[in-house]
Image (cartoon, rainbow, N blue to C red):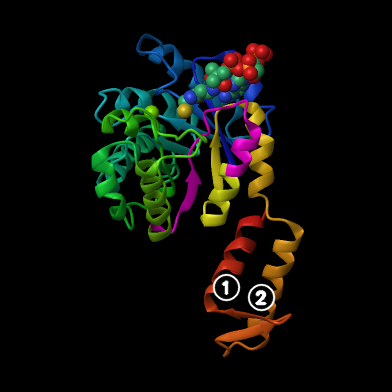
Amino acid sequence: MRTLLFVPADSERKLAKALEAGADALILDLEDSVAAERKAPARASALEFLQAHAGKHRLVVRVNALDSGLTDADLDGVVAGRPEAILLPKAEGGAAVIHLDAKLTAREAIHGLPEGSIKILALATETAAALFVAGTYRGSSPRLAGITWGAEDLSAELGAETNRDAAGRFTSPYMLARNLSLAAAASARVQAIDTVYADFRNLEGLRAEAEEARRDGFTAKMAIHPAQVPVINDVFTPTPEMIASAHAVVAAFAADPSAGVVGIGGVMYDRPHLTRAERLLARIKP
Ligand code: COA
Ligand code: MG
C-alpha cells in the first residue's frame, strides 16, 4: 500500500468521506485525534465501520499506547471487526510488538479468528527510549508488517520548540528518528512507511517530502487529509519507466544466472540492483 489515511474514529462524517478518498488503507484512530471522553464512542463507531467495510477496504486501527491503560479496551472493542492491522503508537522495540502480539492472540481465540491474522504496524520513534531500541524489531513477530515513525510526540518528549525549520524541513533529531525507522523496517524486512505531513494545505511541500522518502526507500506515507491522498499515491506509484527498467534488470540476470554483474544500455547493474528491481516488481503485483 502507498497511502494510509488517518480518520478520527469518532467522526462518522470523516469515516464516510474517507471511503471515497482513494487511499489504499484507512487508519481508524482511537488515539491522539480522539479526546479521552470520546474513546468509548470511538471504539463503537470503529467497530461498526469495520463490520460494514472490512474485506472491501483495507482497514487499520490505531489503538492507544501500551502504557495508556486503554489498549485492552481498544482491542476488546475492535478485534471482532477483524481489522487488517493494528497500528501501535509509542512502540518501544520488538518487546512492544511481542506484547501486542500476545494480546491479539488471546482476542483472536475469543472471536474465532485465525491466529496471526491481524497484522501489526509499529510507530517506532515517538519516545526517546524508542530510538535506542529501533534495532530490535527484527524477528519480533510474524505479525509485524510495517514500521512508521512520528515526530510530534517525540518533539514533546525531547522538549523541542519545533520539529521543522523555517523552510518546513524536519530538524536533525527528527531526521535521525526517520532514518532509524527506515533502517528498522529494512532490518525487519517489513514496509517502511513515512510519517504524516501536518501542513495539509501545502501539497507542494507534501510532494517534496514524499519524493525524498521514496528516494530513500520508504514505499508509503501516511495522510491526514483527503487532499493529500492523490499526491502520495502518485509519488509512490512506480512509473512505467521504473517498471520497464526493473523488468530489464531481472531479465538480464535471468538470461545469465551465474552473472554477478550485467551491462544494460551502457550502465552497470550488479546484485543489489537486482534486489531493488525484484522488490519494485513485488510491490506492483496485484
Ligand atoms: N478523513 C476523512 N475526511 C476528512 C479528513 C480525514 N482525515 N480530514 C478532513 N476530512 C473532510 C472534512 O470532514 C471535510 O468534509 P466536510 O466539509 O464535508 O465536512 C473535508 O474533508 C474538507 O476538510 P477541511 O475543511 O479541509 O479540513 P477540516 O478543517 O475539516 O479538518 C483536520 C482538518 C486536520 C481536523 C482533519 O483533516 C482531520 O481530522 N485529520 C485527521 C487527523 C488525525 O487523524 N490525526 C491523527 C494522526 S496524526
Ligand atoms: Mg501521537
* Mark 1–mark 2 distance (CA, rounded to whole Å): 8 Å
Give residue 197's position: percent from left, percent from top.
53, 33
Q: Is residue 12 magenta?
A: no
Rendered residue at 74%/80% (across/down): 265
* Magenta span: 188-208
Q: State if disc 2 and disc 1 touch (CB < 8 Å).
A: yes
User: Which residue is painted at 40% across and 22% down in the image?
Assistant: 32
Question: Dot 1, how many residues are within 10 Å of its Cα: few (below 14), some (14-19), or many (20+)?
Answer: some
Camera sees residue 171: yes
Q: Which residue is mark 1?
A: 273
- Residue 70 or residue 92, whichever sits in front: 92
Residue 24 visible, this angle: no
Question: Which residue is labeled 2 in the image?
Answer: 249
Picture coordinates of residue 133, whole percent (x, y): 26, 49
Task: Name which quarter of the figure residue 130 lies in.
Answer: top left
Q: Which mark is residue 202?
A: none
The residue at the point 31 percent across, 50 percent down is 134
Query: In the image, residue 109 lies at what x, y percent?
Result: 36, 38
Compared across the picture, whether 26 is left or right of 246 comes to: left
**Could you tell whether 160 is left or right of 55 in the image?**
left
Query: Is tag 1's residue or tag 2's residue first in the polypeptide sequence?
Result: 2
Tell me if residue 47 comes above or below residue 137 in the rendering.
above
Label tally: 2
Q: Toward which corner of the image does residue 67 lie, by quadrant?
A: top left
Res 62 quadrant in image: top left
Amino acid type at circle 1 is: His
Whether 182 is drawn above or below 210: the answer is below
Three-letter amino acid code at the position of disc 2: Val
Assign a secondary structure to mark 2.
Answer: helix
